[in-house]
Image (spheres, rainbow, N blue to C red):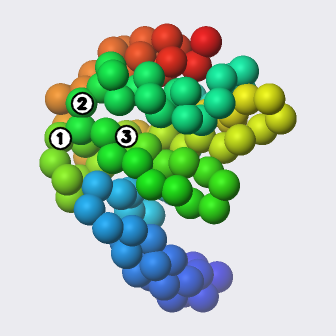
Amino acid sequence: MKNVLLPAVVALAACSSANGPGMSGPEVRASAPLIYVQSARQPDDITACLHERVFSVHETSVGSATEIAIGPRSNAVDWLITLTPSGNGSIVKVQKSANASDDIPEPELRFDIARCTT
């Protein structure tokens, strides 16, 4: 079964890596979310707040969702925050790259996300 899935994973990796500088690769998207919450704030409000608090923020739209890639380099992503509109607010999903740098410590980012989603 693993041999059958490998071509699909490789194809997905090729598609996902075409997101441009600063956007996540399949490795980050495949990771389990560290944070998965619903917020009463709209995605635009959360994005603006994160821009004020966190450096190296790169955002893009993916359908109705907003992806915020955070990393010290434009071609590497340490954190991926996905904001999906939901009713009168947003679903917030935060994922961490397995090889993330220590430039943005997890406790600091958790605090910033808590401040921006409440």
Say which label, 2 or 1, has the lower sequence index: 2
Q: Splitting the image into 4 quarters, where does residue 5 fall?
A: bottom right
Question: Is 99 situated above or below 6?
Answer: above
Q: State the separation of the CA atoms marked 2 and 3.
A: 12 Å
- What amino acid is at disc 3? Trp
Question: On the image, numbered disc 3 is attached to which residue?
Answer: 79
In the shown orientation, is residue 21 left or right of residue 42?
A: left
Q: Residues within 10 Å of mark 1 (few under 14, many from 20)?
A: some
- What amino acid is at disc 2? Phe
In the shown orientation, is residue 95 left or right of residue 56?
A: right
* Element class at badge 1: loop
Q: State the separation of the CA atoms marked 1 and 3.
A: 10 Å
Residue at image coords 69%, 33%: 90
Which quadrant would the C terminus be assigned to in this image? top right
Residue at image coords 51%, 18%: 116
Residue at image coords 26%, 62%: 21
Question: On the image, numbered disc 1 is attached to which residue?
Answer: 72
Say which label, 1 or 3, has the lower sequence index: 1
Say which label, 2 or 3, has the lower sequence index: 2
Question: On the image, numbered disc 2 is attached to which residue?
Answer: 55
Residue at image coords 56%, 60%: 62
| Tag nearer the camera, 2 or 3 | 2
| Tag nearer the camera, 2 or 1 | 2
